[in-house]
Amino acid sequence: MQGAPTTTSSAVTAARRGSAEGLHELSTVRLLQLLRVADSEAIAAAHAAAEATARAVDALVEVWPRGGRLVYVGTGTSGRIGALDAAECRPTFGIDEERVLAIIAGGAAALSRAVEGAEDDEEAGAAAIADIGTGPDDVVVALSASGATPFTCAALEEAVRRGACGVAVTADRSSRLAGSATIPIIVAVGDEVVDGSTRMKAGTAQKLVCNAISTAAFIRLGRVWGNRMVAVQTGNAKLRRRALAIVEALAGVEAEAARALLEAAGGDLPTALVMGKAGVDRAAAAECLRRAHGNVPQALRLAGGDG
C-alpha cells in the first residue's frame, strides 16, 4: 500500500509492549504509524477467520428461506457494531427490519452513551433473547472481544439452548463465549495500542466479520446481481438515481423506460427488474419474488426471464 510504514508488524507490537508508558511522548506521525500497523493486524485476524465466517454465512443462507433471522448481540462497542450492521441491511439489501435485529445491553440508550453495569446482567442477556422468540431458524451472532462479557455470554447460551445457531466473534479461543458457540469465530488481534481499548483492533476485526457475514449471505440470497445492489431501497434522490441506473443496465432499457418500470412497480427495484426482464406485470413479478424469498435472479427464472 502506498505510503505504508516500513516498520514490520512484529516490531511495532514489540515496541508497543516495550514502551507502553511512552506513547504520549511520540509524534503525531509516529502515533499514526503505530495505529496503521495495528489496523493491518486486525485485518489479518479477520482474514484468518475466513473459514469459520463462511460457516456462519452458510448457516444464515440455509435458514433464511424458512423465515430465519440474523440477530446481533453485544455490549458497548461490540453492541454498537452489531447495531450498525443491522441498520445497514435494510437500505442496502432490502431486508425487512424484523429479520435483522440487534440487541445491545442497556437498550437503545446504550447506542450513544455508556450504560454502566448493563454488561454484567446475565439475566437481562438471556431475557433479551427469549423476548424476541429466538428459535432454530435464527442465527445469533454474539460479539465480545474478551469472550467473557456476562450479558453476551448468557444471551448466546440462551440462543443455543433454544436451538439457534450461535456464532461467537471473540479474540479468545478459550473463552466462555467461544466454548458455548455453535460456530466460534476467533479474531486473535493481539495487544491493543492503547492497553484494554478494545474499540480499536478488536472492534475493527468485529466490524469486518459482521460486514462479511451480512454481505456474503445476502449476495448468495440474491440481493445482489453481478456487483449491483438489486434490492436497494429508493428512499432518497441518490438511491432513486441508482435504482434507475440499475434498471437501465440490467433490463437493457433507456432512461424513460426504466423510470416507467420503477413507477409501475411502486418504486420497488426488484419488482421493476423482474417486470422489465421477464415482461410480466407487477402482480406476477411480486408473486415470483415472494416464492423466491426476495432472490432476484431466482424470481427471474420463475418468471421466465434469464436470471
Image: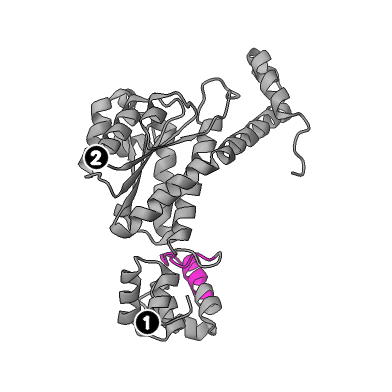
Mark 2 touches mark 1? (CB < 8 Å) = no
Q: Is residue 253 left or right of residue 263?
A: right
Picture quarter with the N terminus: top right
Mark before the other along the chain sequence, 2 or 1: 2
Say which residue label 2 marks. 162
Q: Amino acid at mark 1?
A: Ala
Q: Position of residue 22 (x, y in %)?
A: 67, 15
Q: How far is the residue under mark 2 from the one under mark 1?
A: 43 Å
Q: Which residue shows up at 25% across the image and 44% down it? A: 134
Q: Residues within 10 Å of mark 2 (few under 14, many from 20)?
A: some
- Which residue is depicted at the point 54% across and 74% down? 245
Q: How is the image coloured?
A: one colour
Amino acid at circle 2: Arg
Circle 1: element type: helix
Q: Is residue 242 magenta?
A: yes
Percent x, y for residue 278? 43, 83
Q: Is residue 203 above or below residue 296?
A: above
Residue 261: image quadrant is: bottom left
**Looking at the rendered structure, which numbered label has been put on residue 264?**
1
Highlighted magenta segment, given as a residue range = 228-245
Residue 93 visible, this orientation: yes
